[in-house]
């Protein structure tokens, strides 16, 4: 199953840094085609000798790596049948095939309070710059020769080539930039300044040429980071599976238990809900979504009407500063033959077929004054051009683009610009929660992830994605850790969440499962005088009449004065009632465990998902605590993460799919792509458990060779969802 980087570069990579292409990078020597690699999770720690004894009856099994820090387990190479037999042994909790991972600032540093916090001092009377803090960057490697990173580089490991040189890939056509960009946001200290410019960077190259890697390599990187005793680890990578139980999520939870602050990007699959992916689903990690820094946003005004259309400038675009009304014309999909009449005009172009840069270059050569690219799917998008252009290039939603195209078919349109400043909006691409199964709020917080300038091999570049948001948080954690060296990962996470700024869209707050606690304010987090853990509450799933749920909060007065604590009563909702503790006072450094109770009457309460913020007054401060609960089985996607590949034996194919809640009924129906005629079922099943399914299909079970539309469906609690994919059978 292909697991994408919380690409966390959004959409398109500039050419000055070659584009990431999906590429499975395997540990040498290459794995024979008749075998596969899997991660085996054990119920308790076992020595390498004990593991070899467990594997002894299986002569064709090759032990690859033993993990003691990240997880209790090991990786093996064997044929699928042997792996299936091995999975039946009692000490084995789970067997998971390896997956592919794909690598997914100065103004932004100001926004989160990074410059302000540098005026503060730690217990040694040194300014807060991240000095003495080690941050592990698990990514594509780091260009440690970059002048802005040389002083901060403190070594690392290459888990792709298995050596101690984690340099970014420089191979022509397969070069990477992602890890260097992430490292610069955290700790650049030269021409640009990162969030924690004196923190030490340890680089772990887990994603190789083209930005590709595997679960095994990422696990090995987490394992090594734990051994190296880093203080913080950043993973700007992820997948499209909204589940809490994949090995890397479990490994990040283990890292936190060992005293490491784990930061993970939430993903770039927004704005739909239930899109946050692993490891951003890890309970104990800090999952980070993307917000916008201060940006000048142009709006297209149509003369003769009140209509306004928000334009999202593409990264690398020229300035949107058109000073007079301009004709808007239809530019098709941006081919030269579509752009015969665009001189001095704004070209409206549909997304698809050509890259953004090709469309813009064609329009520039044709004499266009500006380019608007409208989406070919619902919602807006953000992207990067492959090189800097003087031509203004922006994105529109599909709805706006289709409307304008339809109007152009009827009449001529003159348009002008209105430019406004926006800050602290949630990026459309930022993945939303909640998490299936645990029903937790993710992301936990958001940070700037749009138009972020940072280091790349050979220079600097502005990129966007939750990949760029996560290292802002990792850098913030370094500042907090320097100020409070005795604070645990739980306390650092609480400080960031308790002091975050909840963001608004229009006149209402974004939902908790869209932004978590809100946008980080590191200057406030460093001087937090009260800590509430956990920083968010998930009440779980209600199923019984008059269900009652309790949650426990740990309140800590970190100040040097007594503080009085009181809760606000939430807004009344039919069918819900709350019970809070009476007001109480904590002396300096005193702590208290309290209980918050929620009662639900499902006869009166009609919602499926309820969320909001509890307000705890802590002296003169107010801590906003996000909460969420679900009634019955909510409307999460019943099926996700489908992949269909050639199997390990001649004529064999394999499919993988993730069922976040299990399925009462599951199937893969095949249709003829020309007339959508039903061909038959590739597979089906009933009452399947939640989690990942991997199944080999023998040649005699396959339909005749050809290309088919596969409709993969799952039904649970009255809801059925499906994924459609084109598959090809060549045998």
Image (cartoon, rainbow, N blue to C red):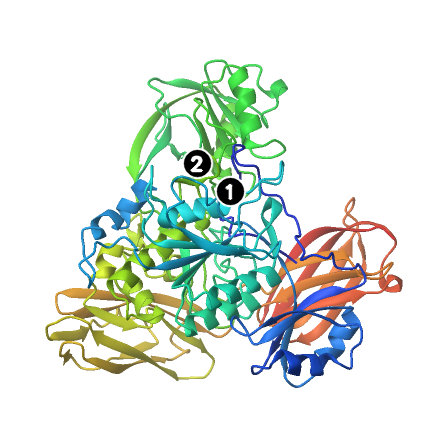
The residue that appears at 54% across and 73% down in the rendered structure is 71
Q: Return the residue at label 1.
A: 177
Q: Give x and y (percent) for residue 286.
A: 40, 63
In the rendered structure, find residue 461 and report the number of the disc placed on it: 2
Q: Give x and y (percent) for residue 482.
A: 27, 61
State yes or no: discs 2 and 1 in contact (Cβ < 8 Å).
yes
In the figure, 148 relative to 699: above or below?
above
The residue that appears at 54% across and 51% down in the rendered structure is 165
Q: Is residue 336 visible?
A: yes
In the figure, 200 relative to 93: above or below?
above
Q: Indicate the quadrant containing the N terminus: top left, top right, bottom left or bottom right.
A: bottom right
The residue that appears at 23% across and 60% down in the rendered structure is 526
In the rendered structure, find residue 560 and report the number of the disc placed on it: none
Q: Secondary structure at mark 2?
A: strand
Please identify the quarter of the rendering in which residue 150 is found: top left
Which of pointers 2 and 1 lies earlier in the amino acid sequence? 1
């Amino acid at each position: 199953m292909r697991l994408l980087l919380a690409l966390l570069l959004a959409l398109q990579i500039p050419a000055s840094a070659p584009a990431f292409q999906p590429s499975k990078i395997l540990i040498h020597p290459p794995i024979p085609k008749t075998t596969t690699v899997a991660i085996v999770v054990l119920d308790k720690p076992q020595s390498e000798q004990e593991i070899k004894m467990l594997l002894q009856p299986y002569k064709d099994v090759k032990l690859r790596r033993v993990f003691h820090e990240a997880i209790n387990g090991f990786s093996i190479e064997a044929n699928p049948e042997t792996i299936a037999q091995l999975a039946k042994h009692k000490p084995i909790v789970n067997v998971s095939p390896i997956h592919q991972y794909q690598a997914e600032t100065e103004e932004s540093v100001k926004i989160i309070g990074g410059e302000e916090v540098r005026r503060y001092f730690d217990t040694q009377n040194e300014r807060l710059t991240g000095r003495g803090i080690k941050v592990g960057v698990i990514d594509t490697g780091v260009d440690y020769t970059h002048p802005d990173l040389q002083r901060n580089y403190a070594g690392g490991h290459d888990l792709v080539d298995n050596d101690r040189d984690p340099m970014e890939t420089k191979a022509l056509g397969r070069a990477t930039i992602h890890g260097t960009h992430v490292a610069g946001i955290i700790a650049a200290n030269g021409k640009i300044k990162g969030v924690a410019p004196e923190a030490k960077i340890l680089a772990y190259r887990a994603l190789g040429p083209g930005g590709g890697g595997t679960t095994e390599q990422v696990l090995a990187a987490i394992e090594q980071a734990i051994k190296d005793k880093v203080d913080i680890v950043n993973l700007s990578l992820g997948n499209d599976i909204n589940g809490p139980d994949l090995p890397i999520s479990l490994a990040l939870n283990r890292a936190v238990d060992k005293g490491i602050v784990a930061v993970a990007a939430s993903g770039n699959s927004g704005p739909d809900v239930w899109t946050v992916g692993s490891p951003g689903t890890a309970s104990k990690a800090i999952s980070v979504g993307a917000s916008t820094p201060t940006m000048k946003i142009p709006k297209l005004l149509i003369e003769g009407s009140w209509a306004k259309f928000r334009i999202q400038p593409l990264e690398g675009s020229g300035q949107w500063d058109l000073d007079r009304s301009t004709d808007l014309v239809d530019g098709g999909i941006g081919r030269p033959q579509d752009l015969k009449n665009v001189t001095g005009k704004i070209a409206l172009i549909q997304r698809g077929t050509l890259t953004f840069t090709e469309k813009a270059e064609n329009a520039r050569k044709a004499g266009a004054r500006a380019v608007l690219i409208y989406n070919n799917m619902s919602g807006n998008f953000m992207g990067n051009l492959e090189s800097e252009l003087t031509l203004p290039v922006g994105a529109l939603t599909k709805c706006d683009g289709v409307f304008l195209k339809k109007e152009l078919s009827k009449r001529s349109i003159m348009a002008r610009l209105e430019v406004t400043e926006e800050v602290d909006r949630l990026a459309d691409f930022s993945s939303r929660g909640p998490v299936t199964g645990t029903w937790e709020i993710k992301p936990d917080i958001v940070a700037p992830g749009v138009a972020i300038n940072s280091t790349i091999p050979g220079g600097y570049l502005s990129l966007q994605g939750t990949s760029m948001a996560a290292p802002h948080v990792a850098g913030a954690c370094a500042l907090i850790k320097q100020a409070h060296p005795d604070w645990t990962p739980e306390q650092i996470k609480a400080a960031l969440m308790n002091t975050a700024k909840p963001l608004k869209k229009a006149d209402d707050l974004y939902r908790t499962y869209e932004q978590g606690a809100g946008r980080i304010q590191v200057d406030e987090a460093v001087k937090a005088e009260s800590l509430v853990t956990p920083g968010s509450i998930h009440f779980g799933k209600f199923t019984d009449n008059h269900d009652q749920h309790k949650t426990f909060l740990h309140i800590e007065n970190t100040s040097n004065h007594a503080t009085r604590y009181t809760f606000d009563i939430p807004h009344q909702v039919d069918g819900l009632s709350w019970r809070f503790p009476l007001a109480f006072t904590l002396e300096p450094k005193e702590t208290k465990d309290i209980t918050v109770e929620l009662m639900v009457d499902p006869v009166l309460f009609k919602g499926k998902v309820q969320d909001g913020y509890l307000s705890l007054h802590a002296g003169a401060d107010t801590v906003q605590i996000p909460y969420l609960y679900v009634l019955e089985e909510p409307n999460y996607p019943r099926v996700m993460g489908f992949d269909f590949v050639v199997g390990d034996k001649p004529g064999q194919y394999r499919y993988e799919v993730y069922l976040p809640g299990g399925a009462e009924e599951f199937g893969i129906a095949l249709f003829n792509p020309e007339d959508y005629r039903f061909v038959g079922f590739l597979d089906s099943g009933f009452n399947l458990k939640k989690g990942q399914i991997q199944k080999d299909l023998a040649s005699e079970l396959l339909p005749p060779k050809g290309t088919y539309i596969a409709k993969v469906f799952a039904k649970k609690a009255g809801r059925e969802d499906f994924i459609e994919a084109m598959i090809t059978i060549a045998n």
